[in-house]
Image: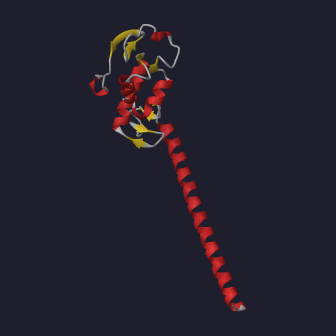
Amino acid sequence: MNKHTRVKIATTIGFILIGIFLIIAYQSQGENNKINEINYSMEVCNEDCNNVYLGMCLDNSSKFYMCNLIDEKCDKTDFELVNKIKYFEDNKINIYGLSTCPHCINQLSEFGKYNESVLEKEIFVFCDKVNNSACDDVTSVPTWKQNGKILTAGYIPFDNLDF
């Protein structure tokens, strides 16, 4: 291989590497712009919405009403579910169950992607996982209470709730 051919190969490889570098830099800049756009839109959403619960805008005067400000999706199903969770919390409705009870697991699954939040807020309590005096009078599960008084026991699909 002569010197002229080696120079051509080296030059070609150099241009390829520069091209790859430019492509990577451009893609990286695009991702950073997307992140900046999301952060900006979240700031605008949060400024416009005065009532946020579990990331959902509940302010009906906001253009982001019924929108999840965390994942920036407007979904009526999520909105209705978050409203039920807020209703439970505001009206001190709690559900008590056992982690080994299939009906309790099904009841918790009604909260969908918000089940961790419901457990953290102790709207749903696994009596076998925590030491909670509210579990003392629970004789069957799941048990529904309001303000500490038993309302009913058993699995209730959320579609059957009237609020």
Q: Is residue 10 left or right of residue 52?
A: right
Residue at 66% from the left image edge and 86% from the top image edge: 8
Q: Position of residue 2 (x, y in %)?
A: 70, 92
Q: Is residue 120 left or right of residue 25?
A: left
- Position above or below: 71 against 15: above
- Position above or below: 58 against 131: below
Nearer to the camera, 46 or 139: 139
Residue at 32% from the left image edge and 21% from the top image edge: 155
Nearer to the camera, 15 or 143: 143
Residue 161 placement: quadrant: top left
> What is the image's colouring?
secondary structure
Q: Position of residue 151 (x, y in %)?
A: 34, 11
Nearer to the camera, 20 or 79: 20
Residue at 39% from the left image edge and 13% from the top image edge: 145
Total numbered labels: 0
Q: Position of residue 120 (x, y in %)?
A: 51, 25
- Quarter the N terminus occupies: bottom right
Residue 26 placement: quadrant: bottom right
Q: Is residue 126 left or right of residue 154?
A: right
In the orientation shown, which residue stands out farthest toward the right? 3
- Quarter the C terminus occupies: top left
Residue 90: tell me if it is visible. Answer: yes
Residue 51: tell me if it is visible. Answer: no
Q: Position of residue 67 (x, y in %)?
A: 41, 39
